[in-house]
Amino acid sequence: MSAILIIEQILNGLQFGVMLFLMAAGLTLIFGVMGLINLAHGSLYMVGAFAAASMAGLTGSFFIGLLAALIAAALAGAIIEIVVIRRLYKAAHLDQVLATFALILIFSEGTRWLFGSFPLFLEIPKLLSGPISLPGGIQYPLYRLSLIAIGLAVALGLWALIEKTRIGIQIRAGENDREMIAALGVDISKLYTLVFALGAALAGTAGALVGAIQSVQVGMGEPVLILAFVVIVIGGIGSIRGAFIGALLVGLTDTLGGVFLPELLKLFMETGSAQKTGSAFASMGIYILMGGVLIWKPTGLFGARA
Amino acid sequence: MNKFLMATAALALGATTAVADVKIGMITTLSGGGAGLGIDVRDGFMLAVAQSGRSDIDVVIEDDQRKPDIAVQLSDKMIQSERVDIMTGIIWSNLAMAVVPAVTNQNVFYLSPNAGPSPLAGRGCHENYFNVAWQNDNLHEAAGAYANSAGYKNSFIMAPNYPAGQDALTGYKRFHTGDLAGEVFTKLGQTDYAAEIAQIRASGADSVYFFLPGGMGISFLKQYADSGIDIPVVGPAFSFDQGILQAVGAAALGVVNTSQWNKDIDNPTNAAFVETFQAAYGRLPSLYASQGFDTANLLISALETAHPSDADSFRNALRAANFDSTRGKFAFGPNHHPIQTIYAREVIQEGDVFTNKIIGVAFENHSDAYAGDCKM
C-alpha cells in the first residue's frame, strides 16, 4: 500500500463527501426551517440528473444540461412545495413520511413514463475529461477534482447566504421561531417555498454532476438519500455546518473503510474471505460511525435541538 | 397413418368441444431499476407467441417489482386462482430461488428465460424446471477461458458481495489459469468505483474482469474510461447488453464480453428475430430479448407435440428442444440446462448506435459444473 494510493483514496473520499453535502444541505435546511422530513429529496436528485442528461443530449453541452438540472429541480421543488408539502407542515412526522414516500413513487413512475426504462447517457464534458498529474506523481481524474472544487464553492456560497444576507437571517430566524418572524411581517410561506426550491436545486445539481460519472436511471436517488440522512443525523439536524462535517466524515469513512478494512483483515485470514468479510464490515462503517457519534452527542455534532 | 388418425381425432374433438387452451404465467420485472431486463424478456417472448399465430396461448403477465415477496404472492395467485400450466419470466436469481421450487413441486412447469442459480442446476434440479438461458456461472467461465486465450496472466477481478457476485468470481477462477493481481468485492448497488479504480491502478494487473450488472456496470465503465487506465477489461454480457450500451457510450468501445447470443450470429432464425423485433418495438434486441424469444419458441415447439396436462409427453418434448433457436445449435443437458456455444464479443459503434460484434468462440458445447450433482 503506497502513499500515492492512500492520497488518491483520501481525494476519493473527499469527492464523495462534498457530493453528499449537496444532498444533505438541502435536506437539513428543509428539516431545520420547516420541520419537514422530505423523503422525496432523492427524487429531486433524479430529476436533476434526467434534466441534465436530456438537455445535454439535445444541445450537446454539459453545462447547459447542468443549468437545466438546476432550474428543473428548483421548479419541481417549488411546485411540490406549493401543491403538496405546504399541507404537511402541521401534520405529524409519520404523515409527512407517508406523503413524501408517495411523491417518490409518483416521480419514479412519471420519469419512467417520460424517459422509458433504460438508463440515459450523460457524458463528462470534454473540457474536464481525463486524468491530470498531481504533485507526487498521482494521476487523478480532472472531473473528480472539479467536483471537489464545486462542492467546496457551493458550501462557501451557502455559508455566505445563511450568515451574510437578509434571506439568511430570515432562514435562521425561521429555524428558531417561526411564529415570531411571521409576526414581524416576513411572508413565511414565500420563505418556505424559497428554502424548499433552494434545497431542491442543490439536490438537482448534485444529481447532474454525479450523473456524468454514474448511471442516470430511475431510482438513482434513493441510495443517496439514505446516506444523506445518515449525514444530517451525524452532523446535527438543521445545521449546515454539521451537514458539511458529517458529509466529509461519511465520505471518508465509506471510501477508506472499503479499501483498508479488507487489507487489514488480510493480515489475519486468506485473501478471498478477507475480501468478503472486509467489504461486509466496511458497508457497516458509516452506521457504526453514526452510532458512535450519537452515543457521544445525542443531538449530532452541531445539533441544537433534542 | 398414426398421424392421420390423431389429426382426425383432434378434428372430431374440436368439432364438439373447444381444444384446451394453454395458460402461461409470466412473472417478471417491469418497474424499478431492473425493469429494462424484464421488458426485453417479455417483448421477446410475446413476439414469438404472436409469430406462432396460435390463438390458444393465453399469457398472463405480472410485475414482481424485483421483490421476492411479491414474486411469491404472484406465483401463488397464478397457480391457485389462474390455474396456469406453465410459468416463466423471472430475471433475478434470488427471486427464482424463492419461486421456482414451489412452482415445480405443484406440478407446474417452469421455463427460466434468465436466472440460473447453481442450486437449481445441481442438487435442487427438478424434472419440471428448464433453463433456456444459461447456468449463472457460464458467461463468467467463458470470460476466464477467453482471458487465457488472450494471454492474460494477472487479472484483477471484481464483483458485488452477494451470491451471484461470488458465483461470478468462482466461475472466472474455475477456468482462468493465470494469477490474480487483486480480488475485490464491492457493495451491491454501489455507484462510485473511484476506490476500486485506484486499487486497479496500483495492482500491476494485465487485465480487469468485472461482473457489475445494470447501473453498477454503467457507473464503473464511465469512471474507468475517465481514469486514463488502459488495462484491458473483460466482462460478461450483462454489462454490455443493448439496453445499457447507449448509456455507457464510447467508454465501452473495444471491451470484450462473453455471451451465448449476439445479433450477428448467422442463422435464419436469428436474422428474422433481429429484424422483426426491431420492426415491432423500434429498438435492437438484447440478449435478454433473445432469451425470451427462445423460451417461447421452445414452449411452442413442445405444445405441437403435447398439452402440458399430459406432463410426461410435454416434458419429453421440452427435453428434445426441437426448435430453431436464435443461437443456432441448442440442446439440454441432463439437468435441463443448456449445452451451447459461448462467444466472445467486442463492443463496436455502428453509426450512432453502440452494439456488439462476435470476435471468437470461448466455449463450444459448454455445459455447467453442477450437472453431475443433479439426480432426477
Image (spheres, coloured by chain):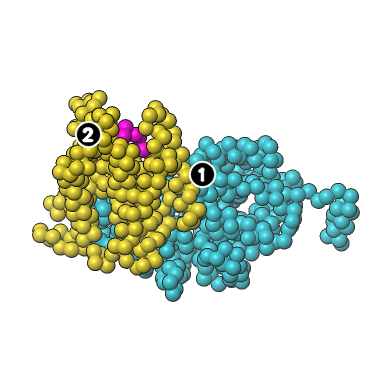
Chain colours: A yellow, B cyan
Q: Is residue B122 magenta?
A: no
B286 over B368 or under it: above or below: below
Disc number at residue B300?
A: none
The type of residue carrying mark 1 is Gln
Query: Label 2: chain?
Result: A
Q: Which residues are magenta?
A: A34-38
Location of mark 1 (residue): B65
Q: Amino acid at mark 2?
A: Ala
Contact (Cβ within 8 Å) of mark 1 with mark 2: no
Label 2 element class: helix
Image spot of residue A255 (x, y percent): 24, 45
Q: At which x and y percent is residue B313? A: 73, 50
Answer few, some or many: residues within 10 Å of disc 1's Cα (few below 14, many 20 plus, some between 14 and 19): some
Horizontal and vertical percent for residue B251? 34, 64
Q: Nearer the viewer, residue B251 or A244?
A: A244
Q: Main secondary structure of the magenta part?
A: loop
The quadrant in which the N terminus of chain B is found is bottom right
Residue beneath the point at 41% across and 51% down: B168
- Depth check, mark 1 against mark 2: the one in front is 2
Residue at 86% x, 61% y is B4
Q: Residue at x 66, y 54 (%)?
A: B299
Taking the magenta stretch, the answer to whether it contains residue A36 is: yes
Q: Position of residue A175 (x, y in %)?
A: 25, 33
Residue drawn at (69%, 40%), measured in percent from left and top?
B82
Seen from this angle, which residue lies furthest left?
A135
Q: Which residue is mark 2?
A: A173
